[in-house]
Image (cartoon, rainbow, N blue to C red):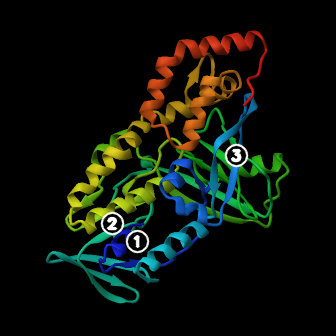
Amino acid sequence: MAAERLARAGVSTLLIDEKMAWEKPCGGGVTFKAYRQYPFLREGRSHSVSTTWLHSDESPPARLALEKPLLIFSRRELNQLLLDRAAAAGAELLTTRVTGVEREGKGWSLTTRAGALQADQLIIATGARNPLREFGTPWTAGDTMVALGYYIPSEQPHIDIQFFADLEGYIWLFPRCGHLSAGICGKGVSAAGLRQRLETYLAERGISFNDAQFYAHMLPALATSSWPNNRLDGPGWLAVGDSAGLVDPVTGEGIYYAMRSGELAGQFLAEERPEAYAGQVEAEFGADLAYASTLARRVYLGRFCGGANTTRMLQFLRRSTQIQSVMQELFAGTMSYRELRARIRSNFKSTMAEIALNTCLRRIVTI
């Protein structure tokens, strides 16, 4: 996104990546918010999904018919779509690994496996496992979550999301074009523990993963204390996406934030106003992601009325049109976490009254 924006503005742009289009453990869900802002996403090879089943280990499942479908991409194909757009705009693509970066006057000297290169400005988009630690977000183990999963040669028409009362994270089953992405993400749990939980879940559902390809990755999930010192920029460089810690600490979703931060970085560099980048990111979504970090642990591990929050969420979803409306906006990506808090507070009494009435009447609200 950054390279495309710069190249379209006539700036000589080199995009360096040792993998280019590659796969990773990720549901690949693109929200309505993302494809509304970037309509070209509809042109890519994706699977539109309108039905989500939400599960917990202490409640019957709840079905949510999405008013605004999710587009489910293979990350390899989404990456290729964006790379093709950057190349079409005039960016040069170089498949190699950057092994060193040094400040040289007002510019940069890069060491790569393909040889030495010079640059005036850098945009760092190296992901969570950023080897250039002096650039982008400096985090500790408490600022990350693990994501891992299988790509299974199977199909289903809907999304499944499974919550657990003792896990700050969830399991997902996302249908893609020709396969399922079956994965788990979690914080404070070892990769081995997460993998065992996922494999147990798949076995219990009768989903074979014996011949499926396995992937594992690390995601930023910044702690609340880390957000004030999060580094988005420095002299001659800007960081975007996972390298800048721009991932939702509650859901682990990062596609929209990576795309938008890349676009903003390209825009402000093209306009020769790089100093405006960090402030714009903060205003659009950075502050809300920081606020989300105060909620993540409570969302997954907190309790309400004697039960796990995730269990109560499903129970309330089945009994309340107001909760359903909130969930629709969350899945669409059109509600911030601060808006979520305000909505819940302002509607709390009427929502609880609706839930109580429908519970007494044993009425399940059609979703």
User: Taking 125 as reference, is 47 left or right?
Assistant: right
Inter-mark Cα distance, 2 to 3: 33 Å
Circle 3 residue: 50
Residue 185, label in figure:
none
Do residues under tags 1 and 2 come within 8 Å of each other at their CB atoms? yes
Q: Earlier in the sequence, mark 1 or mark 3?
A: 1
Identified by mark 1, the residue type is Glu
Q: Quadrant of residue 207?
A: bottom right
Circle 1 residue: 4
Give me the residue at 79% from left, 14% from top.
362
Q: Quadrant of residue 41?
A: bottom right
Q: Residue reaching furthest bottom? A: 115
Give me the residue at 62% from left, 34% from top.
166
| SS class, disc 2 | helix
Circle 2 residue: 266
Inter-mark Cα distance, 1 to 2: 8 Å
